[in-house]
Amino acid sequence: MLRPPIVTLDLEGVFTPEIWITFAEKSGIPELRRTTREEPDYDKLMRFRIDILRERGLTLRDIQAVIAEMDLLPGAREFLDWLRARTQVIILSDTFYEFAAPLMAKLGHPTLFCNMLEVDEQGMIVDYHMRFEDGKRAAVLALKLLNFRVLAAGDSYNDVSMLLVADHAALFRPPANVAADYPQFPVITEYDELKAMFRALF
């Protein structure tokens, strides 16, 4: 039976810079540079971030102000437009809807599956809520049950479970440690290379 292709892609590192790294640089808090590229335990990473924000008195609005000024990675919008003209695309991210809105506008409002933050009356982030446990993997498996052929790419440890269950997968601009830990995935560094991979699979 023929299965139509659908593409699932990570957001940060594929289309945008890492939000937390950008915020770390703007706020002068180097500890916030840690991402899933270095820390595969996402809950541990988020608890660490929330604690630092609380200690420094930084609110959700402080982070949103930085995100509003962020640019996409060079060529990201053009690549996504090219891809969406040829097949369906879903962005699967561990970021939060409260963060992503201005970036989605710059990308032309693609479909995004991500998570939610809990904020108190002072605007402080007090908790986070995953929309679904291991949501990237669950989304790919659900799409396969719907008879789609899933093509996926991401850059970090938190993308690996998605890549492992996709029909075809690649790492896009991963750090050396992620590429070394998962040598079964081809490493792609340019959007033109991603285009070539997808062309061959459509």
Image (cartoon, rainbow, N blue to C red):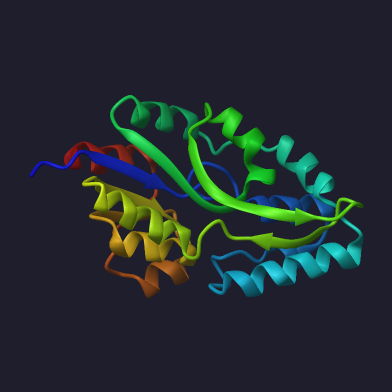
Task: Give the residue drawn at x 58%, y 34%.
Answer: 104
Residue 170 can be seen, yes or no: no
Left or right? Give the position of 34 relative to 87.
right
Left or right? Give the position of 195 relative to 60.
left
Please tell me which residue lies in front, 149 or 82.
149
In the picture, the quarter occupied by the C terminus is top left
Residue 56 point in image, percent of width and height: 90, 63
Please tell me which residue lies in front, 140 or 108.
140
69 is higher (above) or lower (below) than 91: above
Residue 41 point in image, percent of width and height: 56, 74
Left or right? Give the position of 18 relative to 67.
left
Residue 92 point in image, percent of width and height: 47, 49
Residue 196 can be seen, yes or no: yes
Left or right? Give the position of 101 relative to 111.
right
In the picture, the quarter occupied by the N terminus is top left
Residue 138 point in image, percent of width and height: 39, 59
Please tell me which residue lies in front, 31 or 165.
165
147 is higher (above) or lower (below) than 161: above
* Quarter of the view holding residue 51: bottom right
Task: Give the residue drawn at x 30%, y 37%.
Answer: 195
107 is higher (above) or lower (below) than 167: above
Task: Give the residue drawn at x 59%, y 29%.
Answer: 106
